[in-house]
Image: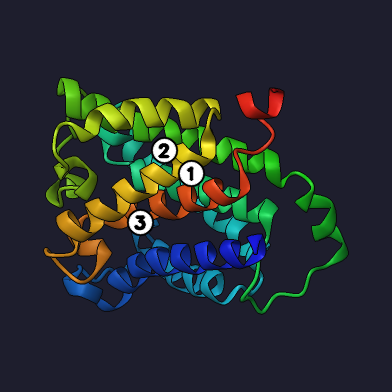
């Protein structure tokens, strides 16, 4: 069952990532075409389109995920980090999320519903998947918690720029949702009561997408729902498989 869930998370993540490449290459969903392939932004288009498609198919998954993880790290530090320290304020949250999800895929592999065949070296890498899952959980729980502080206390306003042009669905939830984002995010960060907390957070993310994002556009890249869907996928997997090796539950 875990391999099937991993496969579904991989496919959803690949589709969300593919959108960005399709936007740059073909103007998908009304996006701006960028064929300046010798620039960092222009070269990202083919990487995102081809890489996203390979992730969806589950083909060369670990190698592709490793390359895309590096691409997202470069994109974050070249495009977003200089705007501020916190990813939800500098506009680089999605890049951070993709970076650590792809890092996890490198260790976790494609799961079910994939075209890959496991090589011997991949078996040795996979033993570290619970640690990679923990790192991903901690980073995404941290950014998730920051949304709560924005909701409740009005902190960490987003900087101006392209990312600020499309309001995130999670930021348009009622103010009381911020209290759960602080509490639930902190518990997920610590790895405490992970399964029920992750399930409740999945419900919140699903509600955010259905009521706040979907009415704006059918495409997540245009309705502010990309981050919400990524959170939903990650917390769903954590709910079914646990927090990983680095957590209060593991220590207990």
10 Å neighbourhood of mark 1: few (<14), some, or many (≥20)?
Answer: some
Q: How is the image coloured?
A: rainbow
- Asked if the residue under mark 1 is in contact with the one under mark 2, i.e. CB atoms within 8 Å, the reply is yes
Is 140 above or below relative to 241?
A: above
Is 120 above or below relative to 85?
A: below
Rendered image: mark on residue 77: 2
Among all residues in the image, which is located at the extreme front? 196
Looking at the image, residue 200 sits to the left or right of residue 73; the answer is: left
Spot occupied by residue 180 in the image (x, y as percentages of width and height)? 30, 31
Give how far apart the Cα atoms at labels 3 and 1 are: 20 Å
Rendered image: mark on residue 216: none
Asked if one can make out residue 37 in the rendered structure from this viewpoint, the answer is no
Picture residue at 44% right of the left edge, 34% below the top? 141
Among all residues in the image, which is located at the extreme right? 120
Find residue 219 and report its image quarter.
bottom left
Q: Secondary structure at mark 2?
A: helix
Spot occupied by residue 127 in the image (x, y as percentages of width and height)? 79, 47
Q: Which sits in the foreground, 130 or 54?
A: 130
Give how far apart the Cα atoms at labels 3 and 2 are: 23 Å
Find residue 16 and report its image quarter.
bottom left
Rendered image: mark on residue 73: 1
Q: Secondary structure at mark 3?
A: helix
10 Å neighbourhood of mark 3: few (<14), some, or many (≥20)?
Answer: many
Q: Which sits in the foreground, 113 or 195?
A: 195
Rendered image: mark on residue 229: 3
Q: Pick whichever of labels 3 and 1 is earlier in the sequence.
A: 1
Screen quadrant of the C terminus = top right
Q: Which sits in the foreground, 88 or 239?
A: 239
Screen quadrant of the N terminus = bottom right
10 Å neighbourhood of mark 2: few (<14), some, or many (≥20)?
Answer: some
- Looking at the rendered image, the disc whose residue lies closer to the viewer, 3 or 2, is 3
Q: How many marks?
A: 3
């Amino acid at each position: 069952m875990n391999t099937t869930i991993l496969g579904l998370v991989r496919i959803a993540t690949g589709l969300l990532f593919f959108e960005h490449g399709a936007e740059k290459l073909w103007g998908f969903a009304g996006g701006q075409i960028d064929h300046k392939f010798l620039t960092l932004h222009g070269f990202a288009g083919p990487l995102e389109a081809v890489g996203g498609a390979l992730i969806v198919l589950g083909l060369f998954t670990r190698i592709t995920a490793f390359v895309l993880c590096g691409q997202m790290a470069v994109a974050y530090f070249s495009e977003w980090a200089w705007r501020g320290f916190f990813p939800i304020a500098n506009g680089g949250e999605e890049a951070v999320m993709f970076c650590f999800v792809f890092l996890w895929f490198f260790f976790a592999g494609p799961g079910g519903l994939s075209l890959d065949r496991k090589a011997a070296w991949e078996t040795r890498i996979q033993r570290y998947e619970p640690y990679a899952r923990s790192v991903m959980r901690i980073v995404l729980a941290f950014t998730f918690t920051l949304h709560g502080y924005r909701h409740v206390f009005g902190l960490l306003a987003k900087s101006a720029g392209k990312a600020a042009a499309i309001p995130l669905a999670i930021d348009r939830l009622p103010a009381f949702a911020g209290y759960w984002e602080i509490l639930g995010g902190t518990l997920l960060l610590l790895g405490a009561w992970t399964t029920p907390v992750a399930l409740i957070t999945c419900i919140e993310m699903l509600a955010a997408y259905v009521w706040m994002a979907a009415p704006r556009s059918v495409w997540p890249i245009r309705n502010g729902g990309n981050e919400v869907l990524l959170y939903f996928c990650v917390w769903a997997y954590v709910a079914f498989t646990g927090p990983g090796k680095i957590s209060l539950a593991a220590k207990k």
